[in-house]
Structures are given as C-alpha cells and as structure tokens.
Amino acid sequence: MPPEAARPAAESGKPLRLGGLTPLTTIDFPGRLAAVLYCQGCPWRCTYCHNTELLDAATPPALPWPDALAFLHRRRGLLDGVVFSGGEPTLQAALADALAAVRALGMQTALHTAGMYPQRLAALLPQLDWVGLDIKAPAHRHDAITAAPGSAGRPRQALRALADSGIDFECRTTWHPGLFSASELLALADELRASGVTCWAVQECRTPAAPAWTLTPEQIRQLGAGFERFTLRRA
C-alpha cells in the first residue's frame, strides 16, 4: 500500500462530502442518541462492503454539508451526538472542521473507521468522544479482504494510538468462516487482548454468499474471555 501521505485527502477548505445520513440511531454511538453522517470515498475494496455506493470519492455529494449542518442545528437539545461513518471518514481533510462544527453545537462526536490513516486518526482524537475501529482480519488475511496490498499494518497503528489516548473505543470484526477460520478468529481475539482492547464486537457477515456461522458455544466463550465487553452481532 502506498505511504499514507500518498493517498490524497480532500483539498483544504473543501466541505465534507457526504453520501447521506441516518437521522437517529441508538446503536452506532453507545449510550447516546445520535445521527449518522456517511462520508464519501474509501480506497479499500472489502469483499463484504455494504456501502459500495460510498466508495468512489469523486461521486458528487448526495447531501451538501451546509444542509447536514442545518439539520443538526434543528436537532440541538434532541441529539446527544453525531457519528461520522462511511466510506472512510479520515480520507477527507474536511473532517476536522466538521468535527469542530458539531462540537460547537454542544454535541459529542464519534467516528467509525478502518484505521487506514493512523496519523490522521491520531490528530483527530482530541475532537472525538468515541471510536469504532474495524480490525478486519489477522494480518496475513487482511490484504485479501481489503484488496489493498500492505494494508494490515495500518489498523494496528491506529489501535496503538487509540489505546494510548484513553478515549473510549470498540474494535469490531466482520466475520464468516469463508473469510478465515474460527481458529484464526480465536487467535485474533488473543492479539486484541494483548493489545489492550477491552471492548470487541464480532459481526456476522451478511453478504448473500456468506456461509453459515459454525461457532460453538465453547468457541464463543473463548472469544469473549478477558474482554470487559464482548458482543456477537447476528443478522
């Protein structure tokens, strides 16, 4: 994968490019009533992506940033926070200003990210209250899922930055046994525990061709052991 600086973000001064919003969620920002803003563009091509309409960074924004901000103004006092999801929000340089604008409204901020730009994420952490970080696979399986050679190290760097920051965060892994084996999933659990992760969610891959889950009760117990919070998210 090219160096981080070689992947262009949005031009300085350009507004955030948005593909849409969810006006209210109770699950995407734990413990808060929040709206979700979906950021346009992602350089990875994950095999199970369910937001493919957001991948092309050059697609004209479906939701102008001023309209999104006007919506949030109208929800002051009703929403606790705003989640920036995608796509990959950290692709865009405009994210920092967008976070500042949301915080100026008195709302908290959350980010869903695959950690592909760890230095940018580290710079944004002072403006964030919660982060959901995708850890897609064991390192040796990562490139096959993202179609991005050399991508495995990026989310691990992002994880180190999060663990050092003290910010509340969750790691999440989308899985089915066709992506990698249950034994590799158990090894990933060991890796995350050793990295200081306290909150992990394993999410069922919902693509039509995904094979059925084969996790046994004992494997589920082993996956969750040692985490303060462990969640299986099934379809």
Image (cartoon, rainbow, N blue to C red):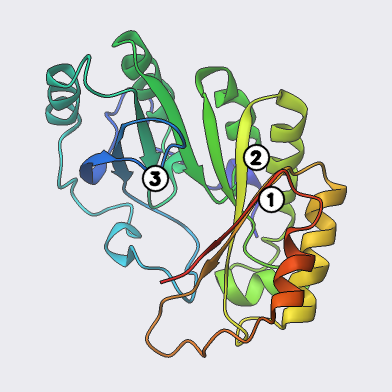
Q: Which mark is residue 118?
A: 2
Work out whether mark 3 precedes mark 1 in sequence or the reverse, and give the earlier one.
Answer: 3
Amino acid found under the numbered disc labelled 2: Pro
Q: Is residue 205 visible?
A: yes
Work out whether mark 3 precedes mark 2 in sequence or the reverse, and give the earlier one.
Answer: 3
CA distance separating discs 3 and 1: 26 Å
Q: Which mark is residue 154?
A: 1
Q: Residue at x 69, y 34 (%)?
A: 162
Above or below, 16 against 198 in this view is above
Q: Position of residue 176 (x, y in %)?
A: 57, 80
Amino acid found under the numbered disc labelled 1: Arg
CB atoms of marks 2 and 1 within 8 Å = yes
Of 197 and 136, which appears nearest the observer? 197
| 185 on left or right of 129 | right
Q: Residue at x 52, y 24 (%)?
A: 129
Q: Residue at x 64, y 29 (%)?
A: 122
Amino acid found under the numbered disc labelled 3: Ile
Q: Secondary structure at mark 2?
A: helix
Q: Nearer the viewer, mark 3 or mark 1?
A: 3
Q: Secondary structure at mark 3?
A: loop
